Every structure is written in structure tokens, then in C-alpha cells.
Image (cartoon, rainbow, N blue to C red):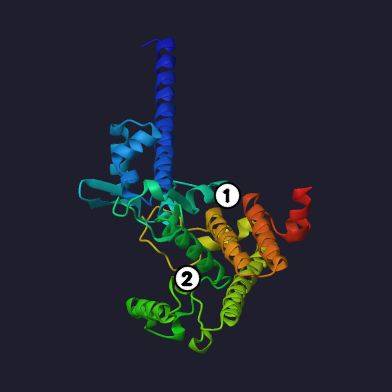
């Protein structure tokens, strides 16, 4: 074989390698597209079938079928059969992130994880709905499907990291063997929730109202207002703690620390996945905080406090997005850095 022929052969092999790499990248991008679609549309089973995915995303059914099969085999997805409907859903958002099958930008959270609405005239109960939480208004239904659970999983992971820093482990030795009773502890939580007895709203908000004041509307309002504010104050305190950690070791420092952190893991992930703090964990928290602030405003909590919550959410969002390096490296506190970024 001549020199030119050999060179051409080497170029062909290199082009083939690049093509293989690009095809693998495109496959992972398709994983992400379908995962996001399934999360966003998880409130209705008929929207999460092979046919619906193909139709709504403009992909060939054979391509969708192959991707769904691969993600089921990887235990990222599972499916639920209801009559002739075979609906797919995401089993663990953290595993999907860790395996590199999906990622989210901060701006995607409202669209994918936010409250959805459906016109009551176009909706009939038993049409394959799967609502985790919902409210019926005069002309529409506001709801969240499985995305509510997945969002909670991201938030739980964040606080698992935050609440174990800098030790990197939980203090399970306080009550040896108590973790064995997690199924029973679920009953305790649900028992308390049911005992609140002020209707669905009080149960959702987990507000405890003394039965002796139930007939006094103003006192009940004050209880709701006080308890919701106290919860937001606690969340604010925890997030302020995270702000201090970022000033101390920076975004990358926290990521590196999380690699060695032994925290509660909500899935049994493959050995080659990296369990590490990700930006999406914080963005899930700040997104939920913003939703919570809407409730706070409705019950009459002062605007100044709500603005304080929202400002902290904005600061932390940007710090994580732009990977704030810490007070020593940046030469300024996180508050000062944030102001400099907004100029």
C-alpha cells in the first residue's frame, strides 16, 4: 500500500472515530430531551407513551422506542401500564444527572418543574391523569405530576450535603437502629398530617391549629402566617449557612468536598456514576423557595421579608451558575460579588 493510500486510510479511520463520538453525544442529547419531556408531561399518562413522545417531539417512533428501551435498561426510566396505555416516567432525577443523561439550566426549572394548568372543559377525570398535587378552580385545574417528587429529590440531596458539612456524615449513632424503622416513621408523619384536621390546605402546609381557636378566623390566620414565616426563616438560615460555605471554600471547593461526602443516597446508582454536588441541587431549592414565597405573600407575610428571601435566592443562583470562587479568591464577599455582577 502506497503512502497516499495509507494516509487516506488513516484519515478515514479518524473521521469514523469522530463520527462515532458525535453519534454518542447525540444519543445522550436525545436521552436528555426525552427525560425532560417526560418530567414536564408527567401529569398525564397518555402524554408519556411512545406514540405521544414521537408525535410531540417530531422523532421517528423507532428512534423513540430504542431510546426508551435503553433508558429502561439503564434504570433511569420505568413504565406504568393502564389499559392500552404504556406510560414512561423518570425513576430518579439524581441518577439521571449523575450518569450524565440529562442536565438542566437554571431557566428551565419553571417550565419543567413548575405548576401546570389545564382547562376544565378539556379535562375529564379518569383520562390518565397522574397528579401528585392539584387544585381545582372555576375554569382550570392547577397541578403537578411526578415532577413534584423529582424536584423534592433534588432538594433533599442539597440539604443532605449542607447538613453534613464539614463532617461528611450523619450522626446516626444518636439513635442506634432507628434507621431500620423508616417504614414505621412514615406512618408517624402521615398520622400527624391527618391529625391537623383543618382540611386539605392545612395538611399540605402542615400547619398545626389548636382546635380551641378554629372558630376564630383571625386567630387561625395568625397561626398560618406565623408558622409559614417560621419555616421560611429556618430555610433562610440554612441557605445563609450555604452562603458562608461558598465564601469560605468557593463553589469548586464545595463540589470537591462533596465527592468524599458520605450522605444518604436516594438511588442505587451504577458504580461508574459520580455522586457529587451539582448546580441543579441548589437551583431546585431556590425554585421551591420562590414558589413558597407566593404562599407567604398570600397569607400576608410582610413584603420586606419576602424580598429578603428572593434576594438570597438570586444571589445563590448566580454564585452557583458563575461558580463563585470564595471570598479569598474573588477578593470580596458574596454580597459584594453579586452587586459587582449586576452592574
Residue 110 horizontal/vertical position (percent): 54, 50
Image mark for residue 240? none
Q: Is residue 286 visible?
A: yes
- Identify the residue at the far bottom of this view: 212
The correct choice, above or below, for 326 with respect to 86 in the image is below
What residue does disc 2 label? 201
Residue 91 horizontal/vertical position (percent): 35, 55
Distance of label 2 from label 1 (alpha carbons) = 29 Å
Packing grade of label 2 (10 A; few <14, some 14-19, many >=20) is: few
Front-most of 325 and 55?
Answer: 55
Residue 269 horizontal/vertical position (percent): 37, 57
Packing grade of label 1 (10 A; few <14, some 14-19, many >=20) is: some
The correct choice, above or below, for 210 with respect to 164 in the image is below
- Residue found 44% across the figure and 31% down from its top: 22
Q: Secondary structure at mark 1?
A: helix
- Residue found 50% across the figure and 71% down from its top: 205
Disc 2 or 1, which lies upstream in sequence? 1
Q: Quarter-wise, where is residue 95 in the image? A: bottom left
The correct choice, above or below, for 225 with respect to 86 in the image is below
Front-most of 86 and 219?
Answer: 219
- Residue found 52% across the figure and 84% down from its top: 215
What residue does disc 1 label? 106
Q: Secondary structure at mark 2?
A: helix
| Lateral position of residue 295 relative to residue 184, left or right | right
Amino acid at each position: 500500500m502506497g503512502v497516499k493510500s495509507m494516509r487516506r486510510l488513516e484519515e478515514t479511520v479518524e473521521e469514523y472515530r469522530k463520527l462515532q463520538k458525535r453519534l454518542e453525544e447525540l444519543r445522550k442529547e436525545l436521552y436528555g430531551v426525552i427525560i425532560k419531556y417526560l418530567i414536564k408531561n408527567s401529569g398525564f399518562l397518555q402524554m408519556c407513551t411512545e406514540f405521544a413522545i414521537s408525535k410531540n417531539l417530531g422523532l421517528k417512533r423507532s428512534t423513540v422506542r430504542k431510546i426508551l428501551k435503553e433508558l429502561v435498561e439503564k434504570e433511569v426510566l420505568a413504565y406504568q401500564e393502564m389499559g392500552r396505555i404504556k406510560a414512561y416516567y423518570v425513576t430518579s432525577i439524581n441518577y439521571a444527572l449523575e450518569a450524565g443523561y440529562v442536565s438542566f439550566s437554571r431557566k428551565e426549572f419553571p417550565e419543567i418543574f413548575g405548576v401546570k394548568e389545564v382547562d376544565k372543559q378539556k379535562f375529564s377525570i379518569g383520562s390518565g391523569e397522574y397528579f401528585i398535587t392539584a387544585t381545582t378552580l372555576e375554569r382550570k385545574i392547577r397541578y403537578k405530576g411526578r415532577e413534584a417528587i423529582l424536584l423534592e429529590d433534588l432538594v433533599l440531596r442539597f440539604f443532605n450535603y449542607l447538613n453534613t458539612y464539614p463532617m461528611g456524615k450523619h450522626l446516626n449513632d444518636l439513635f442506634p437502629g432507628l434507621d431500620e424503622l423508616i417504614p414505621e416513621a412514615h406512618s408517624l408523619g402521615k398520622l400527624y398530617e391527618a391529625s391537623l384536621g383543618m382540611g386539605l390546605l392545612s395538611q399540605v402546609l402542615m400547619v398545626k391549629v389548636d382546635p380551641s381557636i378554629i372558630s376564630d378566623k383571625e386567630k387561625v390566620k395568625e397561626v398560618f402566617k406565623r408558622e409559614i414565616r417560621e419555616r421560611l426563616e429556618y430555610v433562610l438560615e440554612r441557605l445563609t449557612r450555604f452562603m458562608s460555605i461558598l465564601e469560605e471554600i468557593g463553589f469548586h471547593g464545595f463540589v470537591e468536598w462533596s465527592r468524599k461526602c458520605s450522605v444518604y443516597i436516594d438511588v442505587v446508582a451504577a458504580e461508574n456514576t459520580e455522586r457529587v454536588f451539582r448546580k441543579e441541587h441548589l437551583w431546585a431549592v431556590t425554585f421551591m423557595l420562590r414558589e413558597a414565597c407566593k404562599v407567604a405573600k398570600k397569607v400576608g407575610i410582610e413584603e420586606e421579608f419576602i424580598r429578603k428571601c428572593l434576594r438570597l435566592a438570586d444571589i445563590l443562583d448566580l454564585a452557583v451558575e458563575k461558580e463563585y470562587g470564595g471570598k479569598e479568591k474573588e477578593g470580596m464577599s458574596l454580597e459584594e460579588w453579586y452587586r459587582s455582577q449586576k452592574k
